[in-house]
């Protein structure tokens, strides 16, 4: 489920629709949680589908560390890519704002940690990275871990509208990390090692 203080808006002809904050969302806020209404499709289920369904799943899903395709039931599936994303996924089945997000600003993800199937050249934002690759989690997990760690300790001290969707065990883990009683899990935990797919794109 996406943060409730967001809405779907048309951004432009290049990216289409996006998810925009309707109120100020401070860094350290949980912006999305994997919940019971989100649906997972196994690779076998994906391969058994007709082309139109495969196209939809390729457009609106990400892959978890099992290789399953995760389809968000709400407008969270419209969060756009940015190399300067203001949200990051974590190893705990939720995303967190790593920057303050102002009203009217898009919530963005770096698709590099979503286990994409094929590389794609993204909109040029003036960054060194121009292309998103299926194995970006291998390359950049430590960079993303540092950004997550920088705001993770704020979680218990902020209003968290999505807290009720987080299990008691996960919340206790969050508290232990914030109290420095446990090491934070790396975002690399989300990586799906799709060896066949990686081999294919490396041969292109």
Image: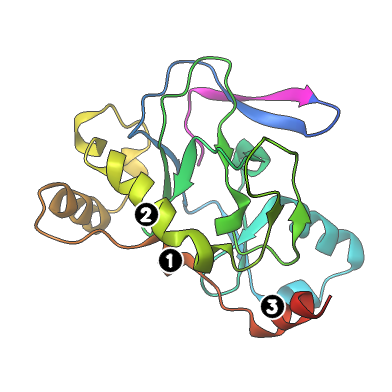
User: Residue 145 has which mark?
Assistant: 2
Question: Which color scheme is applied?
Answer: rainbow
Q: What stretch is highlighted in magenta?
A: 1-11
Q: Which of 157 and 100 is in front in this view?
A: 100
> Does 16 appear above or below 39?
above
Tell me what residue is drawn at x 22 percent, y 58 percent: 169
Residue 8 position within the rendered picture, expressed as x and y whole percent measured from the top left: 66, 26
Q: What element carries label 2?
A: helix
Residue 55 position within the rendered picture, expressed as x and y whole percent measured from the top left: 84, 58
Q: Which of 178 and 137 is in front in this view?
A: 137
Residue 180 position within the rendered picture, expressed as x and y whole percent measured from the top left: 11, 53
Give the class, few, some or many, for how many residues have Cα within 10 Å of label 1's Cα (few <14, many ≥20): many
Tell me what residue is drawn at x 48 percent, y 27 percent: 4
User: Residue 188 has which mark?
Assistant: 1
User: Residue 198 has which mark?
Assistant: 3
Tell me what residue is drawn at x 56 percent, y 32 percent: 107
Give the class, few, some or many, for how many residues have Cα within 10 Å of label 2's Cα (few <14, many ≥20): some
> Does 108 appear above or below 130?
above
Tell me what residue is drawn at x 52 percent, y 65 percent: 139
Residue 11 visible, this orientation: yes
The tag earlier along the polypeptide, 2 or 3, is 2
Residue 188 position within the rendered picture, expressed as x and y whole percent measured from the top left: 43, 66
């Amino acid at each position: 489920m996406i943060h409730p203080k967001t809405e779907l808006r048309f951004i432009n002809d290049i990216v289409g629709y996006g998810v925009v904050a309707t109120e100020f969302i401070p860094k350290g806020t949980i912006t999305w949680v994997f919940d019971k209404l989100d649906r997972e499709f196994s690779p076998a289920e994906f391969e058994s589908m007709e082309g139109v369904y495969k196209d939809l799943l390729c457009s609106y899903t990400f892959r978890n560390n099992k290789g399953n395709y995760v389809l968000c039931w709400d407008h969270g599936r419209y969060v756009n890519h940015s190399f300067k994303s203001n949200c990051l996924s974590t190893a705990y089945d939720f995303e967190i704002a790593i920057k303050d997000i102002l009203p009217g600003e898009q919530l963005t993800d770096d698709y590099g940690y979503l286990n994409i199937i094929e590389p794609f050249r993204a909109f040029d934002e003036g960054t060194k990275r121009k292309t998103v690759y299926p194995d970006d989690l291998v390359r950049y997990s430590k960079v993303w871990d540092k950004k997550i760690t920088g705001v993770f300790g704020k979680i218990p001290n902020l209003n968290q509208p999505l807290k009720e969707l987080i299990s008691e065990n996960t919340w206790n883990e969050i508290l232990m990390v914030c109290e420095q009683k446990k090491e934070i899990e790396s975002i690399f935990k989300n990586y799906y090692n799709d060896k066949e797919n990686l081999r294919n794109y490396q041969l292109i």
